[in-house]
């Protein structure tokens, strides 16, 4: 595998592959630290306070990863083992870790298939039956509804506020909490101009990821009300998520909040540019108007008989990495994607089809 840090390598694989800026490294080096697991790390506490204000939540907890943030949230909402978690069929928790819900959370997934029409955005109507089902002694209760903003494997879509409001109305009537997997919540906010707080207000728990697009080496923050976060501490500890002297990591996250959220729109513009240029290549199928954030998907027209995987292998030979999923090709832009990379990508793709 070629080095992702090689200047000639164009990496659309993930917005975690940003590298870490010099400025961030300097801030990390000088961070004040304490014992995080005893809530004594001043930099972590400062980060949590900042996130609470941004998201309009009472309390928050620092975790090493987004995966753990989702697990902790699911466990905290859960009353009994085996309860349903309603989520899209292509939710990160199901695709990236097919056994996560069954093995670690001990929940029954209730997957909604909304990829074709809505790219991961299910409606209140889609889940009405399960949410309003009368109690039966042989059927699990619903412990939470989990939504992803923006959707990842389901298609890079942004949940409209109204769609979350409708889910919220239904969930509130039936006393079911909503968890927001906000790995890219700041991308949604940058694209829609709706504050992160407005999305968070409709959800009982929210997590944001500092490694996706925000350029940090590690870290996620899960927020909710005081009672929720108190209970979340139990699961953080249990999973080995209690940390020590991680102010250095929290300092990176604070830096990202202050310097890296404002630039996300640049990544979205790169996606828009790439989407438009891809749509002008006759062998490619893409609906450019669908992509308002930093993830796009396209496919190769069927009659050409090139699988998405074969196409990605050809691209890699030209030092360009994309990812094949569901016979589509996923592109993610981030701070290391340069405008000139888009031009080279388009040239290479044209040359692949010309041979
Ligand atoms: C990446 C991602 C996660 C997991 O985050 P990690 O920090 O990699 O553990 C969860 N949900 C979504 C939507 C993601 O894209």
Image (cartoon, rainbow, N blue to C red):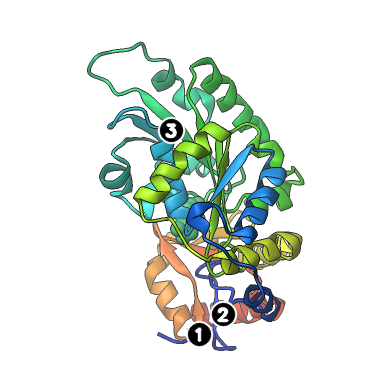
Q: In the rendered view, would you say 173 is above or below 339?
A: above
Is any atom of residue 352 visible in this view? yes
Figure quadrant of residue 109:
top left
Which residue, given by chain and number where applicable, does mark 3 sit on? 77
Q: Of callouts 3 and 2, which one flags the residue occurring earlier in the amino acid sequence?
A: 2
- Residue with the mark numbered 2: 10
Instruction: Tell me what residue is drawn at x 39 percent, y 21 percent.
Output: 130
Q: Are marks 2 and 1 in contact (CB under 8 Å)?
A: yes
Check mark 1 vs ligand 1: CB closer than 8 Å? yes or no.
no
Mark 3–mark 1 distance (CA, rounded to whole Å): 44 Å
Q: Decide which of tag 3 and tag 1 comes sooner along the chain.
A: 3
Quadrant that contains the N terminus: bottom left
Do we see residue 291 in this rendering?
no
Crowd rating for badge 1 (residues with CA inside 10 Å; few <14, some 14–19, many 20+): many
| 8 vs 83, nearest the viewer | 83
Q: Which residue is mark 1?
A: 319
> Is 202 or 294 nearer to us in this picture?
202
Query: Could you say whether the residue bearing mark 2 is in a helix, strand or loop?
Result: strand
* Front residue (pair 68, 188): 68
- Residue 271 point in image, percent of width and height: 65, 63
**How many residues crowd mark 3 within 10 Å: few (<14), some (14–19), many (20+)?**
many
């Amino acid at each position: 595998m070629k080095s992702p840090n090689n200047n000639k390598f164009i990496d659309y694989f993930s917005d975690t592959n940003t590298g870490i800026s010099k400025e961030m490294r300097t801030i990390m080096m000088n961070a004040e630290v304490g014992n995080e697991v005893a809530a004594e790390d001043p930099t972590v506490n400062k980060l949590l306070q900042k996130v609470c204000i941004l998201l309009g939540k009472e309390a928050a907890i620092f975790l090493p990863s987004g995966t753990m943030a989702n697990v902790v949230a699911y466990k905290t909402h859960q009353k009994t083992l085996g309860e349903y978690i309603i989520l899209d069929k292509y939710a990160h928790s199901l695709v990236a870790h097919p056994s996560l819900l069954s093995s670690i959370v001990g929940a029954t997934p209730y997957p909604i298939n909304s990829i074709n029409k809505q790219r991961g955005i299910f409606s209140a109507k889609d889940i009405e039956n399960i949410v309003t089902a009368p109690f039966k002694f042989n059927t699990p209760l619903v412990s939470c509804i989990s939504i992803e903003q923006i959707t990842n494997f389901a298609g890079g879509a942004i949940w409209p506020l109204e769609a979350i409001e409708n889910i919220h109305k239904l969930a509130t009537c039936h006393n079911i909490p909503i968890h927001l997997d906000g790995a890219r919540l700041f991308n949604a906010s940058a694209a829609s101009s709706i504050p992160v707080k407005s999305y968070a207000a409709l959800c009982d728990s929210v997590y944001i990821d500092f490694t996706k697009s925000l350029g940090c080496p590690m870290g996620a923050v899960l927020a909710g009300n005081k009672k929720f976060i108190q209970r979340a501490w139990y699961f953080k500890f249990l999973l080995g998520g209690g940390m020590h002297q991680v102010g250095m990591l929290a300092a990176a996250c604070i830096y990202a909040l202050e310097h890296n959220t404002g630039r996300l729109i640049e990544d979205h513009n790169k996606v828009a540019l790439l989407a438009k240029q891809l749509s002008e290549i006759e062998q490619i199928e893409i609906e450019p108007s669908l992509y308002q954030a930093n993830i796009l998907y396209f496919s190769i027209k069927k009659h050409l008989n090139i699988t998405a995987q074969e196409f990605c292998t050809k691209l890699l030979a030209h030092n360009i990495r994309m990812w094949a999923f569901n016979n589509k090709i996923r592109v993610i832009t981030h701070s290391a994607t340069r405008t000139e990379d888009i031009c080279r990508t388009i040239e290479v793709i044209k040359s692949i089809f010309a041979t």
